[in-house]
Image: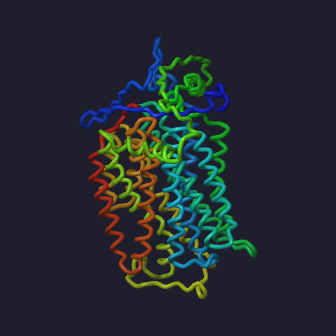
Amino acid sequence: MSRHVFVGDAEAEEPLLANAHLETNVDSDDGEVIFDRTVSTKVECVKKKYTFEEAVDEAGFGLFHWLLLVVCGWANASDAVEIMCVSFLLPTARCDLRLSSSDMGILTASIFLGMMVGGYMWGYLADQRGRCRVLVVSLSVNGVFGGLASVAPGFWLFLLLRFISGIGVGGSIPVIFSYFSEFLPRLRRGAMISALATFWMAGNILAAGLAWWVIPQNWAHFESWRLFVVLCSVPSLSSALLFKIMMPESPKFLMEAGEEKEAACVFQLMFKLNTWGKGKKKQFALCVTTINDNSSTPLQKEQLIDIYKKALSPIREMFKGVLRTRSTALLIVFYCISFGFYGLWMWFPELFKRVEDGGSPCANVSRSYSLQNESCYPVKTAIYMEGFFIAASNLPGNIFTILMMDSIGGKALLSHSLLLSCVFSGVSVISWNALDVMGTELYPTHLRSSALGFFTGVGRVAAIMGNVVFGRLLDSHCAVPVLLVSGLLLTGGLIALLLPQTKQTELT
């Protein structure tokens, strides 16, 4: 999968989506989303040319898409590893870094704060400059600063480096799903995006397995958890390298940017790999949508306030017209599921440690830790073993969504799984997979990454709040955060009923 196949002239090397205006119409609830281009859009279809969906179908489905799934899945898994890294190192690192309970809560929330900052920023840049190049940079930021945290001598430097690493994680999560969806034929999109989401579970299993293997080791002059932090940065760095040297730009983005030759080269590459060994050749003539740039002021001469307004324009468009209802509903759903999932999930290792110490994870007595009198060694491996099996418990839900997404649809799976999650948290993985599918299909190309980045940012705010609430109430009023999570998941399930059905809909 060579990157040189789609590099064109100097002008093509700088794809830039200019401002485009879409009039949006939606049928009642059948998921048929129609976007009508206005005068600012020029469609060049002189002869019989392929639209995007037709070109994807003509390119076939096969080896290219499985290789794409592996590369994008590894990137998705690397984000999961980086997020769970702090959770698994806390039981031992808190002694070496002299962390109080308050410090542990701040450290757990720091990566989510970084993700909140990076989510919309990277999503907006991906809609403007291209998915692939943004993925390379965001994954590199994640891996480099995550690895540097391993040598931080104190808490505050460690906290800063984890925050910057979180900015990188916040970018790759929304952009990877936009990028992946824009190579897929309509009839297979739901199942394949669900398969991509399954790699998040694989990342959790990998993080738990690494912690189980590395952290219990005891070296005289080097804390084992620092090696664990280094290893957790390897997936992100290797993913950035794979995208840099192997992966093409999204053909949907290239068509929206008017880069017909580059998009045709990507489709030819897809066709060549999908028909490997059959000796077939095909030329792709594309019906390219050219988006005119009506701005008369060069970017370098824009005032700061103009740049700020331009960066916020996708959010304004998301909450206008017919998009307003779905955007409001998605905002509430993302908040509800993120508060519950991350608030509870990130505290599992600490809860297991309390059980291993012979107590109850939900005892109604305040615990006070003495950093001087308490030892974190020898490490009790049961904490990581339990985390490993909890991560693996998501496998049935992932398999179910892969098999049923295209037949049932994201809306039904999202709503029903959220309602069930309020009593059985293992079902929440179905909700996440359905959100990943629907998020890519509910918005047009020029808003897709920005929208996903914005909503994941909202989810990070909820994750931070969930961690703070759990940390404050777990010792004294354990039932309160648990019941709060159940109530929010119930609310999210009901709100999800307001979303349109997107089963096998075309990307716009």
Q: Which residue is at the far top?
A: 47
Where in the figure is residue 178, as x and y percent of width and height? 48, 40
Q: Which residue is at the far right?
A: 221
Q: Is residue 388 visible?
A: yes
The answer to whether residue 377 is above or below residue 274 is below
Q: Residue at x 60, y 40 (%)?
A: 133
Left or right, 163 with reference to 220: left
Name the foreground residue: 315 vs 115.
315
The quarter holding residue 476 reads: bottom left
* Colour setting: rainbow
Q: Is residue 183 visible?
A: no
Name the foreground residue: 440 vs 326.
326
Image quadrant containing the N terminus: top right
**How many numbered discs?**
0
Image quadrant containing the C terminus: top left
Where in the figure is residue 506, as x and y percent of width and height? 39, 31
Q: Residue at x 57, y 61 (%)?
A: 163
Name the foreground residue: 503 vs 11.
11
Left or right, 27 with reference to 168: left
Q: Residue at x 67, y 65 (%)?
A: 150
Name the foreground residue: 417 vs 259.
259
Q: Which residue is at the far bottom?
A: 373
Where in the figure is residue 84, as x and y percent of width and height? 54, 61
Where in the figure is residue 380, as x and y percent of width and height? 58, 75
Q: Residue at x 37, y 55 (%)?
A: 427
